[in-house]
Image: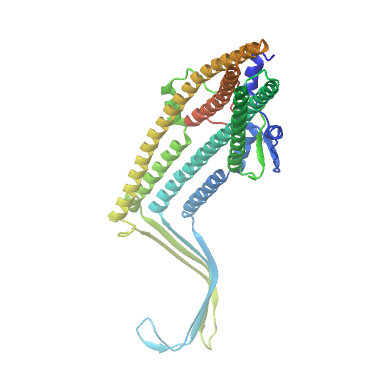
Amino acid sequence: MRTLNQLTFACACSLLVSTAAAQTNLTSSNETYTVDLPTVLRLASAQNLDVQIAREKLTQARASYNGAVMQFLPWLSPGVSFRRHDNFIQDVAGNIIEVHKESYAPGITVNAQVDLGDALYKSLAARQTLNAADHALEAQRQITLLSAIQGYYDLAKAQAQIAVDNEALRISQNLEQQLISAVSAGIAYKGDQLRAQVQTGQTALSLRQALEQQRVAGARLAEVLRLDPAVELVAKETELVPLSLVASNAALSPLVEQALVHRPELQASHSLVAAARSAHDGTTVGPLIPSLGGQAFIGGLGGGIDNQPHPFGQSEDYIAYLSWRIGPGGLFDFSRTRLYQSRLEDARLGEAKLHDQITREVVESITRFRSLSEQLTTVKHNLELAAEAEKLAEQRQEFAVGAVLEDIQTQQDLTRARNDFANIVAEFNKAQYALLRAIGNLATDKPAVSSLK
């Protein structure tokens, strides 16, 4: 005789798919790989393609920033120049003379031209773009972690349903065999045997569907983790139990405030607005700052007229200048100013939209979490009632006063209650992780505490 505690525990147990397949004469040639939640989180952070793409975008933003800073530095051009002239040339007095001469000047030329306004504001914008890419990487990491967590619990939920359906199938098959023997002995009604056979077929169908869901959930999780999809993933947990990650009495307003402070997407949006503002200032204030330039040649100069001695000695030239740019790309380029003003407004509107979206996500997440918390209490109670009803049906059957239809119905109720329990527990855990992500606090080191009493 099964006790109530044993029945409650059975509904939360996850059966490995290999065991389920063996019990239903289903075989799989694919290799299985057992994973737990910490492993899933580590693989998601390290191997997911979206996270790697975000890392490359951060690398690109860092390179762009370094390139913007390099605009403040001069550049060198070491080399040797040679010049040859033959025939007519005009001298400084205006006379046309015939000259055959040559010159050569080995040395180093140092060139420095800095558009101070343009370089300054481009570097500021690039710095903010780098910050935005850094926050975007964290945002993508949290999105990927949540996707991996949800995939893991979908896999665990499917395995729990397999365990429940296997137990229900075993009981239904036993009842069917008893009725077949009873009908053969003439002490049972043939219709009861047919009802039991229908129940067995329905349970087998549900089990087949659960096996399908387990395989699909494993393939989707493998995609997130970037594993070989041919490998069948199996959740390591032997119990699917509710976790306590978020306080059940958490108030909405503090959660919204926390989300607006810690969500990396909003921090990235702040940086993008700052970058757009710097770019806009570069079109209005930047042109007022003059460009500084200079050139220095340090080397030697030699040469002279043909058939005469060619002297060679040290030679230096220095040039410095200050300039402003008027027209396209400089002062009074109103079309460029309007373009960057529009980009700034676009960034501000995007930030406002993201602000509203994050608020909505927090409201949705806390609402779902509270609803599932209440549903969990209800489904626990239903499971206890279904287990008690099934126990009473077994007792009635022992005394030959229970009807077959009653036994089938109680078994259906118990199976449904077990599956509801597994489903609500999985969704309850997923809802807590979704809420943590909504407030920007989804971390791999968050302790997972069971709330099952």
Question: Could you say which is closer to the camera, residue 123 or residue 245?
Answer: 245
Question: Could you say which is closer to the camera, residue 339 or residue 118?
Answer: 339
Please give the name of the residue rendered at 30% of the width and 60% of the height, measured from the top-left corner. Answer: 327
Does 48 appear above or below 298? above
Q: How many labels does the image show?
A: 0
Q: What percent of the width, then of the height, locates residue 46?
A: 61, 41
Does 397 appear above or below 229? above
The image quadrant where one finds the C terminus is top right
Question: As drawn, which residue projects farthest toward the front?
Answer: 186
Q: Is residue 58 left or right of residue 121?
A: right
Q: Is residue 243 visible?
A: no
Q: In which quarter of the image is residue 242?
A: top right
Question: Could you say which is closer to the camera, residue 430 or residue 87?
Answer: 430
Colouring of the image: rainbow
Q: Is residue 248 left or right of residue 330?
A: right
Q: What percent of the width, then of the height, locates residue 319?
A: 43, 64
Q: In which quarter of the image is residue 403?
A: top right
Does 100 appear above or below 20? below
Q: Is residue 419 visible?
A: yes
Question: Could you say which is closer to the camera, residue 414 or residue 347?
Answer: 414
Q: Quadrant of residue 266?
A: top left
The image quadrant where one finds the N terminus is top right
Q: What percent of the width, then of the height, locates residue 391?
A: 63, 13
Please give the name of the residue rendered at 39% of the width and 42% of the height, measured from the top-left corner. Answer: 273
Please give the name of the residue rendered at 55% of the width and 33% of the height, measured from the top-left corner. Answer: 150
Q: What percent of the width, then of the height, locates residue 227?
A: 64, 44
